[in-house]
Image: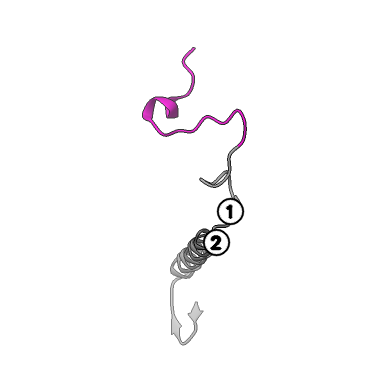
Amino acid sequence: MPFFDVRRERIWVFWRRVLHTSHHRAQVGLCLRLLEDRVPPTYGPTADVTWSGATPTTTLDAARGPQT
């Protein structure tokens, strides 16, 4: 498929768009943190968001979940 002035495979264009979007998301997050503002969550909580009852997975045991 055409991508500006060259031809690329569709999968290449798809991944280019995904990576480009995530790059800008990281840029916005960096700017917000430099301005000492919160980074809003997109797909789940970020390091800037806390809530009661949260179980952070900072260790392998925490990632395994509660043992029953």
Q: Residues within 10 Å of mark 1 (few under 14, many from 20)?
A: some
Q: Does residue 1 sit above or below 65 in this rendering?
A: below
Residue that lies at the very extreme toward the left in this rendered image: 60
> Observer-nearest residue: 38 or 43?
38
Secondary structure predominantly adopted by residues drawn in magenta:
loop
Q: Is residue 1 magenta?
A: no
The image quadrant that residue 61 belongs to is: top left
Q: Residue at x 58, y 57 (%)?
A: 37
Is 57 within the magenta?
yes
Q: Mark 1 points at which residue?
A: 38
Q: In this view, does 66 lie above or below 55?
A: above
Counting other residues with Cα less than 10 Å from the Cα at mark 2, is it few (<14), some (14-19), or many (20 or more)?
A: some
Task: Give the magenta range.
Answer: 51-68
- Find residue 7 and report its image quarter: bottom left
Work out whether 67 lies above or below 58. above
Can you say whether 59 is above or below 26 in the image? above
Amino acid tagged 1: Arg
Q: Which amino acid, by three-letter code, is at mark 2?
A: Leu
Circle number at residue 32:
2
Q: Do the CB atoms of the residues marked 2 and 1 lie less than 8 Å apart?
A: yes
Q: In this view, does 52 lie to the left or right of 30?
A: right
Q: Pinpoint residue 22: horizontal percent, then vertical percent.
A: 49, 61
Residue appearing at x 50%, y 77% in the figure: 1
Left or right for 52, reference 29: right
Residue at (54% x, 47% y) in the render: 48
Circle number at residue 25: none
